[in-house]
Image (cartoon, grey):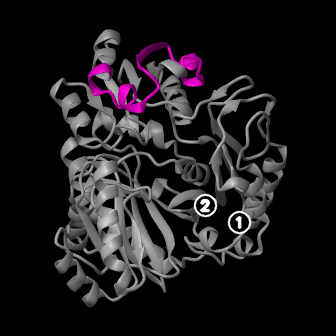
Amino acid sequence: MFKKILIANRGEIAVRIIRACREWGISTVAIHSDVDKNSMHVRLADESVCVGTHQPENSYLNIPSIMSAIELTNADAVHPGYGFLSENAEFAKILEDYKIKFIGPSSKLIKMMGDKIQAKKIAKQYGLPVIEGSEGGVVDINEAKKICKNTGFPILIKAAGGGGGKGMKIVNKDQEFENLFLTAKLEAKKFFGNDEVYIEKFFQNPRHIEVQILSGKNRTVHLHERDCSVQRRHQKLIEETPSPILNEELRKDLFDKTVKMVNQIGYEGAGTVEFIYENNKFYFLEMNTRVQVEHPVTEMVTGIDIIKEQIWIAYTGETALKQDDVKPRGHAIECRINAEDASKNFQPSPGTIGMCHQPSGFRTRVDGSIYQGYKVTPYYDSMICKLICHGRNRKEAIQRMQRSLDEFVIEGIKTTIDLHKKLLDHEKFISSDFNVGWLDNEKII
């Protein structure tokens, strides 16, 4: 097994990885920026190295500085977590060249599946249904107009090189197209260094369904699906498994096709294949070649530690699991707790946490890195922890989440805890009568 793993990340996912390493008996190295020196992941790791200043590009995205930390500490593997460098093919390739194990797929596969246009072609090649639209990137506006005419409005313009809602524009009619097309290209260039965009049919009432996979050289297994349809501006807020809207026939078809594609491309590691679902049909959206924020809901229903499995696959090249080992039980829900003021258009709320009481109890889990006196800075993503609850069924999982949210106390900053209470109590959530645009189109707060 690996002797020492450097965690190229921060916050709750860094803490989560450190815990998995401890259970394997693996030493850990935390990297941190100057403002993160008192963070929980730094306190829990066996060693820590400051890799730069608070700006992400100077620290958590600073490849030369991270490589120096690897050399300084003699780490033999790197876990990238999610975000930052987790899907950076250049970083993975550098590690490969220096014989340092990247806990994830090969740089070639990261590059291949990270390009949304190429990923769509691969999905189509292996039998997954894809969304109608451009076959590849579109540069010429006249060509783009022809595609729109064939596809029909509304359409979605998306950045080829990124996600998270950046460089993404919905066009409802022909008169809006030119301005939004140029705006999307400018945003894509700004955020991803690549102004290439592609065009897809826009769905009116979609759900967001994703399939968790673990894959080795000789076998790919799926860990069933997650429903991530409660979103605000394309950012997930609540995730659950199983999806309350799917039947077993649809599930089997989805799982079979997903496993076939992942197996055929020679994927190794944990990954997630994401889909749009509308009118009893699935359409391939993208593949994330890393662990997901919402992986704990899958862990709660399967009893499988996805992070430990990632490490095992990275070390052996094989998954220790067979499909028959995956036996989901009950229902799990995750709420992302963000340091934001929902009543003020989700304005970030940095500051020092005063009283901090985290819920516990039967089948209740908090993944986080906060504590009393912890300073939430404005420099990184606003998510500070995740609350995950498991029940025998969806109704019990909702009840347990409501109880746990009531127990959660975080003073000194604004959080989205009260928003989650309202969402969990809303008749549309309880009846699962919602889609990805629910929060953007209906006033909840």
Q: Is residue 54 magenta?
A: yes
Tell whether 330 sits left or right of 129: right
For image coordinates 43% across by 73% down, the residue present is 276
Report which residue position mark 1 lands on: 394
- Return the x and y of residue 399 as percentages of the image width and height: 80, 59
In front here: 261 or 67?
67
Q: The N terminus appears in which quarter of the rendering? A: top left
Report which residue position mark 2 lands on: 240
- Return the x and y of residue 408 as percentages of the image width and height: 79, 42
- Return the x and y of residue 244 as percentages of the image width and height: 62, 72
- Is residue 286 shown above or below 304? below
Instruction: List the single residue furthest toward the top.
Output: 72
- Callout 2 crowding tier (Cα within 10 Å): few <14, some 14–19, many ≥20: many
* Image: magenta residue range: 36-65
**First of labels 1, 2 by sequence position:** 2
Pointers 1 and 2 in contact (C-beta within 8 Å): yes
For image coordinates 84% across by 49% down, the residue present is 406
